[in-house]
């Protein structure tokens, strides 16, 4: 099977077969040549009153015609240059804890991908709040978490279905950096400096992440989010950085990033004290050299 750093992905049928073997506890694994949006497809399926309800499910696509990122952004993709997939999970959490699933999903994915990289390089793969996976300072992958009611299969008042979608750049980072006017990374870049990462296949990457989501969501349902701040701190690229929090281009808060709390909110400290941030885009502020 081709490695993930090559531009050639296995056929959808082969990828489906290998993922089905790697994810025996998933009740449905599907990979298609193209679709509008894997998140949209699973949301529609979860809200349906007919069909298979037993979860988890995984749906991947070589090409998404209208792939979505956070805040309604479109996900630029080319067949073979990206790994794009979504998973649906049953979660049993009160509504106020559902937003925590977004940083948890990013954290679990980052931890999973670190396991495919040599130990000496793992700290170069990190998290930018709320759930962007970065290689150094460039975005490698984005995640979109959407939650819906469990429809007629609802088992209790706190029963929801979480749809977690992820897009990972396998190649095309240079072109994406130019078109998006920001730094973008791809797995081929990591593979170029790390033989362990170079050996990873598309199945390895997807299965690692899907399993990490499955385990993390089960742990959160059983034990809550008390371990989230400590886990997040190990991959947090913003910790100690001077940042601006922006909403529609306007700075709403500024200070030093100080990790996350058990709700997954970003903590920002300044001379006014500590503020919790639930939404917003984060910009790292350049610091002036005190000794020019």
Image: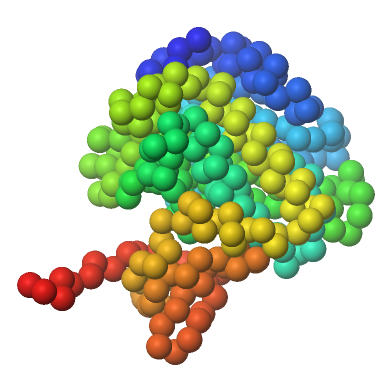
Count of labels in the image = 0
Q: Is residue 240 left or right of residue 232?
A: left
Quarter of the image with the C terminus in it: bottom left
Q: Is residue 103 visible?
A: no
Point 61% across, 22% down: residue: 31
Q: Nearer the viewer, residue 272 or 87?
A: 272
Q: Is residue 162 above or below residue 113?
A: below
> Going by the picture, which residue comes out furthest to the right?
155
Q: Is residue 6 above or below residue 86?
A: above
Q: Is residue 141 left or right of residue 221?
A: left
Give the percent coordinates (x, y) of residue 231. 58, 54
> Going by the picture, which residue comes out furthest to the front?
120
Q: Is residue 228 above or below residue 58?
A: below
Give the percent coordinates (x, y) of residue 126. 44, 48
Give the percent coordinates (x, y) of residue 159. 84, 53
Q: Is residue 204 left or right of residue 290?
A: right
Point 66% across, 58% down: residue: 227
Q: Is residue 97 above or below residue 273?
A: above
Point 47% across, 70% down: residue: 258
Q: Is residue 185 visible?
A: yes
Point 43% across, 69% down: residue: 257
Q: Is residue 227 left or right of residue 198?
A: right
């Amino acid at each position: 099977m081709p490695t993930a750093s090559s531009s050639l992905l296995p056929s959808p049928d082969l990828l489906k077969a290998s993922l089905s073997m790697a994810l025996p506890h998933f009740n449905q694994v599907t990979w298609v040549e193209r679709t509008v949006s894997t998140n949209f497809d699973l949301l529609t399926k979860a809200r349906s009153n007919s069909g298979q309800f037993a979860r988890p499910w995984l749906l991947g696509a070589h090409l998404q015609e209208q792939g979505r990122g956070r805040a309604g952004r479109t996900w630029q993709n080319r067949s073979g240059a990206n790994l794009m997939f979504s998973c649906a999970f049953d979660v049993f959490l009160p509504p106020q804890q559902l937003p925590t699933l977004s940083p948890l999903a990013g954290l679990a994915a980052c931890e999973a991908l670190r396991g495919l990289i040599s130990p000496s390089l793992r700290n170069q793969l990190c998290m930018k709040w709320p759930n962007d996976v970065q290689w150094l300072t460039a975005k490698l992958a984005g995640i979109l978490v959407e939650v819906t009611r469990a429809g007629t299969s609802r088992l209790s008042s706190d029963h929801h279905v979480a749809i977690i979608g992820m897009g990972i750049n396998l190649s095309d980072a240079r072109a994406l950096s130019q078109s998006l006017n920001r730094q973008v990374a791809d797995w081929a870049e990591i593979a170029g400096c790390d033989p362990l990462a170079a050996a990873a296949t598309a199945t390895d990457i997807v299965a690692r992440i899907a399993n990490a989501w499955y385990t993390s969501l089960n742990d959160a349902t059983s034990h809550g989010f008390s371990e989230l701040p400590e886990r997040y701190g190990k991959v947090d690229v913003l910790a100690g950085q001077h940042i601006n929090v922006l909403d529609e281009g306007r700075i709403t808060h500024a200070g030093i990033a100080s990790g996350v709390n058990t709700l997954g909110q970003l903590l920002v400290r300044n001379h006014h004290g500590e503020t919790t941030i639930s939404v917003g885009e984060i910009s790292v502020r350049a610091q002036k050299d005190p000794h020019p």
